[in-house]
Image (cartoon, rainbow, N blue to C red):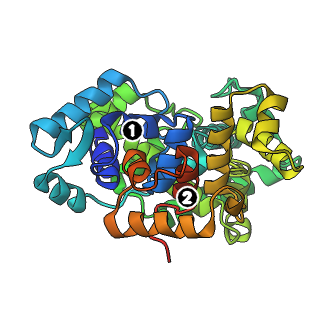
Amino acid sequence: MKLSSLILKIAEKMDGQRSLNGCLHVLRGKRSGQTLQDADTFSVKPYFSLLPKLSEAAFTEAAGALRSRGLLAEKEGLLELTDAGREAAAALPEYRFDGWNYRGREAVFFQRLQLVVQTFSQLRDGQNSFLPITNDRTVQQFVRRLIPVKKESWPETAGQLAEELIAAIRASGMSDLQAALFSHRLTGAGATGWTWEQLEEAAGEPRNSLQLEWLEALHRLLAIAETPQAENAMPHLHKLSESIRVETPLTGSAAATKKLFDKGYSLEEISRARQLKTSTIEDHFTEMAANVPGFPIGLFVTEDDQQAVRLMVSDGDVKRLRLLKEAFPHLSYFQLRLVLSTMKGEPPV
């Protein structure tokens, strides 16, 4: 899996509506109102915040490779797929990322898993003292609570965890490469997890590609481990997935704005109370409109205007604010963004 493939997937969704930087902001998980709205409007939430540390140089190189193959083009600063690009995007597999709901917390899940596997492996070999794979005290304390008090239960629990892992890997549908990457990153007694350099040499593929495969494998595994059914079928893995999924879809600042809005504060009153710009509070409101069921958009946009905007978006697949503003000059950009936010990237009913 290549970074260029993810860019092509996102570009396919944003085709002709956003600049190349829009793709970069989604992959990095930028918390601006525009990017948060784009994630919803263009249905690219699975890719949101997958690569928060993605360098601009790596992104530019991957996008340049797509251009050189004649798959991407730019018109008036907006990203467009060529006919060949649309064919290439359609030929790509459906990736199983869930960036919006994990936002990097899959790394915490893997740290927990690494440590619990290492711990049971060492205890099984009679080693009660060892150097933990992670120095994160929160992870260490979490794993410590999973270790049975009675020593005689250790071998049985270790065996159960191993069976759960095998079952989850099979149920996840991850590829053989992904399963190999996943298992080789684990550490046990006498078996240190492989470095990315070692994996790169063994697989004969670039590290960035392998890391994307590994990341999707984690998301696939989490999707199995966090289900209600796994609580009984895979109790240890289910416990390790606890609190990994982001509980609230709102960013911290938007959640603070929502609390005041729920108390009856107006947008202007919230702006004054929080000492934030009105535009920032408007960003919070569009985030709320996209993620809070039952958001009262009618307080800001009439039903007739909502339907008119939705009809234009649906009929013409127009999601650029400038074009919508030209069609509805009496509506503010804020009002238009609210309507787009409630559409969830789908045509209106």
Give the camera-side residue of 292 and 309. 309
x and y percentages locating residue 143 in the rendered image: 76, 41
Horizontal and vertical percent for residue 345? 46, 61
> Looking at the rendering, which quadrant does residue 126 occupy?
top right
Q: Residue at x 50, y 59 (%)?
A: 169
Q: Residue at x 24, y 35 (%)?
A: 63
Residue 5 image label: none
Q: Amino acid at mark 2?
A: Val
Look at the numbered disc 2 and give the secondary structure of its residue.
Answer: helix
The residue that mark 2 highlights is 339
Q: Position of residue 230 (x, y in %)?
A: 67, 67
Image position of 194 with respect to 287: above or below = above
The image's mark for residue 22 is: 1
Q: Residue furthest front?
A: 330
Q: Looking at the image, is mark 2 or mark 1 earlier in the sequence?
A: 1
- Disc 2 crowd, CA 10 A, few/some/many (<14, 14-19, 20+): many
Q: How many marks?
A: 2
* Horizontal relation, residue 131 to residue 312: left or right: right
Front-most of 216 and 152? 216
Q: Nearer the viewer, mark 2 or mark 1?
A: 2
Q: Is residue 78 left or right of residue 188?
A: left
SS for callout 1: helix
Location of residue 224 by image quarter: bottom right
Looking at the picture, tell me which residue is in the foreground, 69 or 299: 299
What residue is rendered at 71% in x and 26% in y? 136
Residue 16 visible within the image: yes
Q: Is residue 307 above or below residue 12?
A: below
Q: Which amino acid, mark 1?
A: Gly
